[in-house]
Amino acid sequence: MSLVYNDTTNHRGIIQKIERNIYGHDGVGTISGNTTLLKQWTADVNLALDRALSLIFKSDGRWQFDDRNHEGYPTVTTSLVAGQRAYTFVEDTEGNLLLDVRKVYVLINGIYQEIEPVDELYEESMYNGQNLQGDVYRYGKKADGIFLDLIPTTTVALGLKVEVSREASYFLYSDTTKKSGIAGLYHEYLAIQPSAEYAKINGLSNAVPLENRRLEIEKDIKEHYDKRAKDEVKVLEATVIDSE
């Protein structure tokens, strides 16, 4: 069951789940009715969301994950600029921080063509200072930017397209009906993970079962996102063993 963030009417939100985990069934309103506690727990829930995304990105197969609360797809385009080798990618058009570059495409004769990722430390054209110009076929990554092997000779509008992964759409302490952008089956994790941490640090009697539940959900998350592409047929391949 998917969970809203803070449901003070039907008590079926992430915050209400945390209240029960930490304060018992008599703890209704302990967090939701205290702005300071609500802000503190919101920060912890967002850290749990980061942890969930980390698990998802490690397990994600060919169906690439993106937070459902984001508008548009995780694709960033910019102009290819004559004389410019380096291009910085920090945020998408919504202001979400970018976490990783997955693929890079260059617009050539009206068609986006994928270019090859390489280690710029070992590509002479990227460090020899000769600033050679020509058609772009490779790129390197450093810090928050990508570096082209050759420098473009002409400016091409929207000539550079980058497929990225990006941070989650985080909760504000004032959120109520907002739901997390991960699969609804695992919204409970956003309550369990911070609850387990709190229970362990503060020596609560339910620390062990909360920790066990946290590990159980993490296992389920990884398995779910690893097997999402049900429409793809998995093919078993034989392995040749050299007996010599």
Image (cartoon, rainbow, N blue to C red):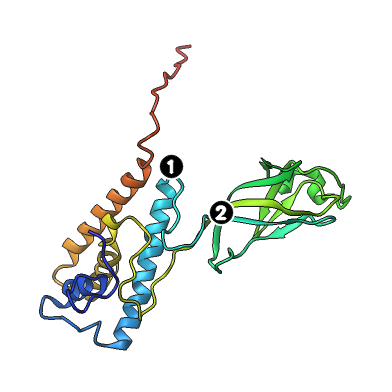
Q: Residues within 10 Å of mark 2 (few under 14, many from 20)?
A: many
Callouts 1 and 2 close, C-beta under 8 Å = no
Q: Is residue 94 left or right of residue 238?
A: right
Q: Is residue 240 above or below residue 205?
A: above
Q: Earlier in the sequence, mark 1 or mark 2?
A: 1
Q: Is residue 236 above or below residue 183?
A: above
Q: Is residue 85 left or right of residue 12?
A: right
Q: Could you say which quadrant of the image residue 3 lies in?
A: bottom left
In the image shown, does 27 or 12 lie closer to the viewer? 12
Secondary structure, mark 1, is: loop
Mark 2 lies on residue: 164
Mark 1 lies on residue: 61
Q: Position of residue 64 (x, y in %)?
A: 46, 47
Q: Is residue 223 above or below residue 77?
A: above
In the image shown, does 159 or 234 lie closer to the viewer? 159
Q: Could you say which quadrant of the image residue 134 lies in?
A: top right
Q: Is residue 231 left or right of residue 119?
A: left
